[in-house]
Amino acid sequence: MARPATMALKIAAIIGAAAALYALALHEHTARDLQRDATVDLTPACAEKLAGLGLASGERFLAASRPARGYSNEDVRAIQRGCNLVNDLQGHFARDGAAARWNAARFVRGSLTTCDHCHQGIGDKRDATGRPQAGSNSLAASWVMADMYDRFTGLLLSYELRQMQCFINSSNGFKPNAADDVLRDVTAYSRFLSAALDLRVGERYPEQGIDEIAASATLKRGDDYIRGAHLYRSHCAACHGADASGMATGEKARYPALAGPQSFSTDSRMNFAMVNSVMPGFICRNMPPGREGSLANQDCRDIAYYLSTLPRPAGDKEGPLTAAWQQIMMTAMPPLTRYADSLRKENGHALEGNGAAD
Ligand code: HEC
Ligand code: HEC
């Protein structure tokens, strides 16, 4: 008699566990639906951006020159959340950062990263005349080229896969699932941007991606990281810090880290390595803010070369030895840099910060 009773107990335990898991899944789904339906608390920058672009629900959406398909209330909330994610990935501006940003922070190892550091102007950077900034990595211009061949891998990469790459390498993290709300909302926002800015699907715009600066676009005297270090000190260190580890106010990055644990990984496209010259292009087109385009091509390559010598997280493809080495260097370098700087200051060569527009 004892045996059937134990059997029944075991079966009951298994059914109980399955029911508990089911209840948990139901609970998670309800929480997710509640969040999808909740009014979105926009970051100040997103409130301004989306109001400027006239985001509203309705039958038709009036883009710059032609009416486009309208948005439902659900679409509007997805676009708003997407804007928040690009502007404030880790929820520093949100009352409940984890919930309001779909807990996007779980996909990023650092605590100060946001997409807007490299996709500036919340994915739509403007130059002094108000036109889209060439080579500014625009998310709007990228969306209309969604599914284009990727120039590094030669593969046809969907918009979701492109975002994943940025989570893994640029944000030094992990990739969200292709159907994750985090990616879906950023896609919704990018698509909206392209419609609001009246961009045509399939067309290549100068603000899409970052135009690289190949060695052939210089006087071909070779890159020099010592010169790069000097240029960095005079043009960049005032904001990004002497050791390029950035500056944070409280929990939020005021100036993003260009090296060290809070920075992009060695596998990132932003890392100047071998034939990849995206970083020099980024610097020449986008930095310093307000004085974009003031540096010569060779200057940008030299600075990028210097930055590539600084320690940063190893990419997932690099293996444990490189990862350990980068880790040691990230720990040892900052105090050494500070020591070298203090010697320099004692000798009367103060850090020549070049008047950061602050
Ligand atoms: C450290 C800088 C950096 C950060 C942070 C970053 N990206 Fe990127 N992103 C890049 C670079 C570099 C490229 C490649 C541009 C190119 O190939 O011209 C890129 C490309 C992309 C593309 C494809 C663009 C195109 O036109 O091919 C998308 C989409 C994208 N990123 C989304 C995101 C999202 C979403 C985030 C935030 C989770 C993010 N990125 C964070 C640097 C960054
Ligand atoms: C006035 C302050 C300032 C100066 C000077 C400045 N930057 Fe930046 N930089 C920023 C800010 C702010 C961002 C983030 C963009 C944003 O939030 O709009 C940024 C972003 C970047 C990024 C992309 C962020 C990332 O995570 O990789 C790079 C690379 C960069 N700067 C390099 C440079 C270089 C090189 C120079 C010198 C030529 C320079 N910056 C000068 C303020 C500055």
Image (tube, helix red, strand yellow):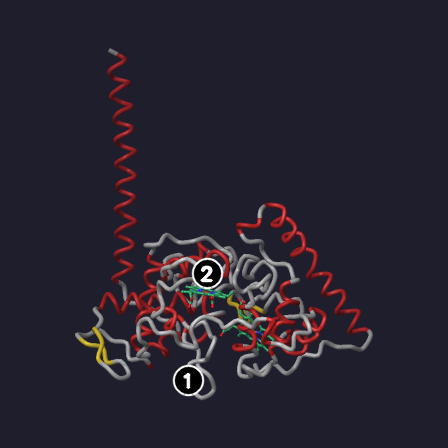
Q: CA distance from mark 2 to mark 1?
A: 25 Å
Q: Is mark 2 within 8 Å of ligand 1?
A: yes
Q: Farthest residue to the bottom: give it.
A: 129
Q: Secondary structure at mark 1?
A: loop
The image shows residue 201 at horizontal and vertical percentages of 31, 72
Mark 1 and ligand 2: say if the CB distance to the nearest ligand atom is below 8 Å: no
Residue 307 percent coordinates (x, y):
63, 66
Answer with the quadrant where ligand 1 appears in the image.
Answer: bottom left
Q: Which residue is mark 2?
A: 166
Residue 128 vertical position relative to residue 238 in the rendered view, above or below: below
Disc number for residue 353: none
The residue where tag 1 is placed is: 131
Dot 1 alpha-carbon crowd within 10 angstroms: few under 14, some 14 to 19, many 20 or more: few
Q: In the rendered view, does 15 fall on the left or right side of 320?
A: left
In this picture, residue 155 sits left or right of residue 258: left
Amino acid, disc 2: Cys
Q: Which sits earlier in the primary sequence, circle 2 or circle 1?
A: 1
Residue 344: quarter of image: bottom right
Q: Quadrant of the N terminus?
A: top left
Residue ID at (37%, 72%): 140
Amino acid type of the residue that numbered disc 1 sits on in the rendered structure: Arg
Q: Secondary structure at mark 2?
A: helix
Q: Which residue lies at the image location 47% right of the left edge and 75% below the top edge? A: 135
Instruction: Determine crowd level at label 2: few under 14, some 14-19, many 20+ residues with C-alpha closer than 10 A.
Output: some
Residue found at the very far top of the displayed protein: 1
Farthest right residue in view: 347
Q: Position of residue 136 (x, y in %)?
A: 47, 75
- In the image, residue 298 sits, relative to residue 156, either above or below, namely below
